[in-house]
Image (cartoon, rainbow, N blue to C red):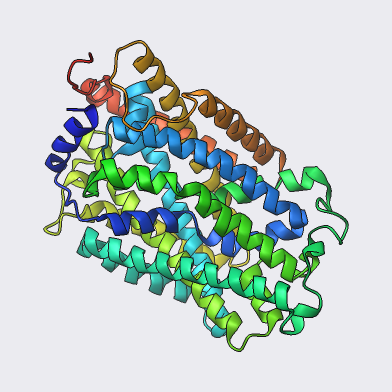
Amino acid sequence: MTSAQVETDKAPEEGYERGLGSRQVQMIAIGGAVGVGLFLGAGANIAKAGPSLIFMYALAGVIIFFIMRALGELLLYRPVSGSFAEYSREFLGPFFGYFTAWTYWLMWVVTGMAELTAAAIYVNYWFPSVSQWVTALAFLVILFVANLISVKLFGEIEFWFSMVKVTALIGMIVIGLGVLTFGFSSAGDTASVANLWQFDGFFPKGIGSSLMTLQGVMFAYLAVELVGVTAGESENPEKTLPKAINTLPWRIALFYVGALTVILCVVKWTEFAPGVSPFVEAFAKIGIPAGAGIVNFVVLTAALSSCNSGMYSTGRMLRTLADNGEAPKAFSRLSASKTPALGITVSVAFMGIGVVLNYVVPEKAFGYVTSVATAAGIWTWLMILISHVLYRRAVDAGRLPASSFPAPGGAKFSYVAIVFLLFVTGLIAYDPDSRVCLYVMAGWTLALAAGWFALKARNPQVTERREPEFEKVG
């Protein structure tokens, strides 16, 4: 029996219902790679970088695949619902597990704020007289209730949200290719592959401006790691997780690189503006009846999908913390429907801050929260990569069993990804508009460190390293 099988057999003792089937896990993985960062955030990044944004998405996509293969190897070594927080705890020590779990919780709380903000902006397309904060609050309450009912309902909602996104993106690409090939609609008169370099070149504002979009690009990829959190509630993690991870490259190639390439061929990059979805703008240019409205509905589902995922993951992370004595014990209790209801409720209450931001600073709310979410996401990815490097060292030394899903190249590509993420962090520090998130993270670090010392003083056993049990290797 492999170590993964040993842990999978133990997993039901966590109390979760294994209610996520292969169909739902696959679509959660696909949906996690397509979110508001692409649908809304790409508009501002196109204005900054022009067509070179396509290259930035491709470059970041390669790094994301390295991260996900590292996570995949860890998941099949020991599939637990705490996922990367548990691996940080095992390989770097209890403090890092504690810090990673709380930081991932923060990431999803602020991402939820961003998605609520985006959803409110999209609704304004049809109902400009409705205040952003009212729409944000309505969506928050609806998704909250759905998450409390059962994991099966969460999975089903996420399945259909993702189905809408995927179908629509493929449809957009096909229509865009039709405009390019056959020249129909008014956009067909100016649509051309040459639009990628005709207006001041592929890097119209220089390589420096293009690199500065990497913060927004990385935000667009947040949530790809969510498939790791589903490990404790997947029916067959040894089968579904590798399949979900191995299909990531084609999803990135199609949904990010492919979709942006087609959009920027159909409409020249100079016509896009920050705060407006380039997909909505492109379909308005093409002139398909109700096309822009349909696309606006699709990007609205993308925002709600991500917010739905945020509620799911934050409740699970709070339960992991409670099980390890690093959050109030009440968070470890499951409701009658086997959902961490209290954790979800508290997380949603904090997401409500996004509603307040939409009331106070509606024009800046999206930018504020995305920068903080990106910084928290980078920390999570770094912990995955460092844990993977340490795991491979332990396997090579014969101290731990090998995973049934090894990352290609061993730990080499994890080192490459670590360097890349540190580079992006440097870019965030350099940009005066985004470096505020590093101040937030510094304050967050101090608060968590203070909480850790308080835990240690009250219950020293909580902060002790606990090794997982395995069968003997060899």
Quadrant of the drawing holding the N terminus: top left
Number of dots carrying numbers: 0
Q: Position of residue 8 (x, y in %)?
A: 19, 37
Q: Is residue 8 above or below residue 274?
A: above
- Left or right of 263? Residue 6 is left
Q: Residue furthest front?
A: 182
At horizontal 83% and vertical 51% (from top left) the residue drawn is 205
> Can residue 452 be spotted in the picture?
no
Q: Position of residue 280 (x, y in %)?
A: 62, 74
Q: Residue furthest bottom?
A: 289
At horizontal 46% and vertical 24% (from top left) the residue drawn is 410
- Left or right of 2? Residue 38 is right
Q: Position of residue 67 (x, y in %)?
A: 48, 36
Q: Residue furthest top?
A: 397
At horizontal 47% and vertical 65% (from top left) the residue drawn is 166
Q: Picture quarter containing residue 474?
A: top left
Q: Is residue 129 above or below residue 464?
A: below
Q: Is residue 305 above or below residue 405?
A: below
Q: Picture quarter containing residue 245?
A: top left
Q: Which sits in the foreground, 281 or 327? A: 281
- Left or right of 293? Residue 104 is left
Q: Position of residue 74 (x, y in %)?
A: 35, 31
- Left or right of 164? Residue 209 is right
> Can residue 191 be spotted in the picture?
yes
Q: Which sits in the foreground, 163 or 358? A: 163
